[in-house]
Image (cartoon, rainbow, N blue to C red):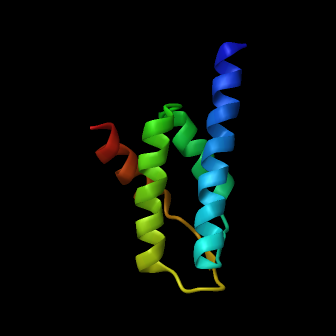
């Protein structure tokens, strides 16, 4: 039960952070659920989630155009997770 609650909080936190990225760059992340699932599979820690989503924000800033649909490559997400997890 406790683990489910932690996972639910982490899921909500990631979704909120990715939604901020969408709003900032006026994009839509087409594979948001896949990204959320991947990150949750790696960590439920709020600080690590923030660091991963901050890295994704930088990636989006450099690799997307406004008013577009963006797919975050899971290889990129995996690389950020690996680097942040140390």
Q: Position of residue 30 (x, y in %)?
A: 67, 67
Residue at the left extreme of this rendering: 86
- Which residue occupies 49% across, 31% down? 45
**Residue 31 % position (x, y):** 65, 61
- Screen quadrant of the N terminus: top right
Please give left or right for residue 55 compared with residue 73 in the image.
left
Q: Is residue 11 left or right of residue 41?
A: right
With respect to residue 31, does 33 lie above or below? above
Quadrant in the picture for the C terminus: top left
Residue drawn at (45%, 76%) of the image: 61
Q: Quadrant of residue 5?
A: top right
Q: How many numbered discs?
A: 0
Question: Residue 63's x, y, as percent?
Answer: 45, 78
Direction top: furthest residue: 1
* Quadrant in the rendering for residue 19: bottom right
Q: Is residue 35 visible?
A: yes
Can you give x and y, in whole percent of width and height, for residue 29 in the image?
64, 67
Residue 34 can be seen in this image: no
Q: Is residue 21 above or below residue 83?
A: below
């Amino acid at each position: 039960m406790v683990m489910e609650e932690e996972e639910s909080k982490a899921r909500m936190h990631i979704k909120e952070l990715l939604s901020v990225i969408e709003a900032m760059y006026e994009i839509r992340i087409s594979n948001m659920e896949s990204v959320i699932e991947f990150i949750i599979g790696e960590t439920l820690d709020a600080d690590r989630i923030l660091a991963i989503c901050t890295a994704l924000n930088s990636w989006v800033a450099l690799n997307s155009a406004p008013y577009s649909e963006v797919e975050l490559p899971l290889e990129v997400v995996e690389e950020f997770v690996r680097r942040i997890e140390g």
